[in-house]
Image: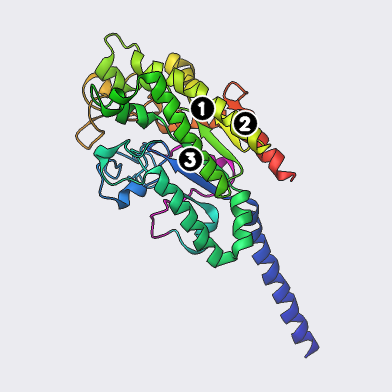
Amino acid sequence: MEKSNLSIIVSSLFMVLCTLTIVAPKAEARAFFVFGDSLVDNGNNNYLATTARADSYPYGIDSATHRPSGRFSNGLNIPDLISEKIGSESTLPYLSPELNGEKLLVGANFASAGIGILNDTGIQFINIIRITNQLLYFKEYQQRVSALIGEKQTQDLVNQALVLITLGGNDFVNNYYLVPFSARSREFNLPNYVIFLISEYRKILVNLYELGARRVLVTGTGPLGCVPAELALHSRNGECGADLQQAVNLFNPQLVQLLNQLNTEIGSHVFISANAFAMHLDFVNDPQAYGFVTSKVACCGQGAYNGIGLCTPASNLCPNRDLFAFWDPFHPSEKANRLIVDKIMTGSTQYMNPMNLSTIMALDSTT
């Protein structure tokens, strides 16, 4: 009898230890939340009636399944690669029916291709999750998690989470410069439009902070005038489009200034600036140094620079995606995304201000 009881106790202890071994790494990995546009959308637009989607071949051709997932990439995108670096699984799109139960504790991706800082950006795409609605979904997410683990633990999970937000590019490409004499370009000259964008972005970031975000990576816009789509439209000899480059050069420094102001007001480094412009420009200016044959021609597309229209099954498709900095007319290849995330992780203050993600993780692990 005693022997039997002892064996039951030993086997029970073994089961508890096994459970602890399985659960411990999950408890250590921080949640991750993603907001923004097609650069970081993990597939929310698959569930919407919109033309801004990446759910057909050859998107996802180099992913584990070799099938499209809604990511605007040949494989993994920036949020996937950040998840890898922080030791977590990729976040699911918030609209995915698979996002429930324990998977909610990993975080969620609220991003939607086509959106911008302004709610009138991307209206041609019809049904997309504008940033105001992404934040409403974040609030709803917290209610769902509270029902699962309680309000206090949910607050801790959100406060300790990593957040990524990528906005701004579409406010130029798919709004101000979308058509000649666009409504916004008639309302504002470019410098005043940028001031307006920054004032609206401030409201978004304050809202995010009020919803519990305490570590937020905020990416500026990349060199928009240098993407294959813009080269096809505006470049004679492969030079970057001047109008969009001017817009970016006005927007990015004011965004950094805004983040510094917010951090001063809060009294903490909540908002971390990721200099996407410098990260992209490295391989745009010298593709060969990073193993690319070109940073001007997209792997998938048609027309000049493969920059006209969308990437479709009928498009030109390069055989080796790792040789191309751009996957489609607007979006970096997985290899380029890896270079960007390496800079996010370990880049100097030229790229990450006031600190990179490795430093953030080291600091946060001690608190």
Disc 3 marks a residue whose amino acid type is Ile
Looking at the rendered image, the disc whose residue lies closer to the viewer, 1 or 2, is: 1
Instruction: Pick the residue in front: 317 or 131.
Output: 131
Sequence-wise first label, 3 or 1: 3
| Quarter location, residue 291 | top left
SS at mark 2 in the image: loop
Identify residue for label 3.
204
Disc 2 marks a residue whose amino acid type is Asn
Identify residue for label 1.
255
SS at mark 1 in the image: helix
Magenta stretch: includes residue 157: no
| Quarter location, residue 42 | top left
Q: Which residues are magenta?
A: 74-98
Q: What residue sits 34% from the left and 11% below the top?
A: 239
User: In this picture, is 167 found above or below 89?
Assistant: above
Image quarter (top left, top right, bottom left or bottom right) of the N terminus? bottom right
